[in-house]
Amino acid sequence: EEAHRSDLITFLGAPEVMSVRKLGVLDRDAASAVVDEMIAHWREHGFGMYAVIEREGGAFLGECGLRYLEDGTVPEISYGLLTAGRGKGYAREASVATLAHGFGPLALPRIVAFARGDNVISRTLLESLGFSLVWERQKEGRTVVHYEALAPSVP
């Protein structure tokens, strides 16, 4: 929401976060445009990215949520945390809640995820959440991996 714009702009410009993400490190104008896209996605689809906020103290730690890929056909889970939020289980907790919402109330049949091939922490998290590797490809001199998770079948 608009109240998180300043934190998100700082987050999207933080090299320790964005250097391993597909958007790369963004300047203020580009980051503000991404926040506009996040807000528009919520309006259009009824779901999107959430701010990850520390329960005690209320510090902004990062983002996690679902968004449609550019072609609008498949939702992607995305997450990222500032250094202060890492190693404390926040990415896992936020991702579990995001997947529960996507496969539960939203009734999505499939959710995908992308990561840099060398981002071992992200890949380990995705695999622990039940994502399966679909492909690895070279893009702009680095390896990109594509994972997917299918909605659990109900007996």
Image (tube, grey):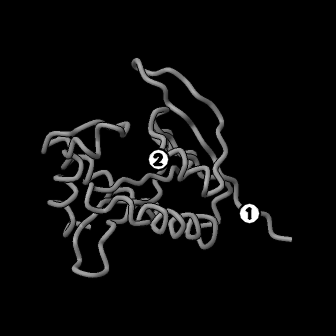
Which kind of residue does numbered mark 1 sit on?
Pro
Can you say whether 150 is above or below 15 in the image?
A: below
The C terminus sits in image quarter: bottom right
Give how far apart the Cα atoms at labels 1 and 2 are. Answer: 24 Å
Left or right? Give the position of 26 relative to 113: left
- Place of residue 51 in the rendered image (x, y in percent of width and height, measured from the top left): 32, 66
Looking at the image, which is closer to me, 11 or 42? 11
Left or right? Give the position of 35 relative to 126: left
Please report the residue visible at 55 percent of the width from the left and 70 percent of the height from the top. Answer: 101
Q: Which mark is residue 121?
A: 2
Residue under pointer 1:
152
Whether residue 9 is visible to the viewer of this picture, yes or no, is yes
The N terminus sits in image quarter: bottom left
Mark 2 lies on a secondary structure that is helix
Left or right? Give the position of 33 relative to 122: left
Looking at the image, which is closer to me, 88 or 16? 88
Whether residue 46 is visible to the viewer of this picture, yes or no, is no
Please report the residue visible at 31 percent of the width from the left and 62 percent of the height from the top. Answer: 85
Looking at the image, which is closer to me, 85 or 150? 85
- Place of residue 148 in the rendered image (x, y in percent of width and height, measured from the top left): 63, 46
Please report the residue visible at 13 percent of the width from the left and 45 percent of the height from the top. Answer: 28
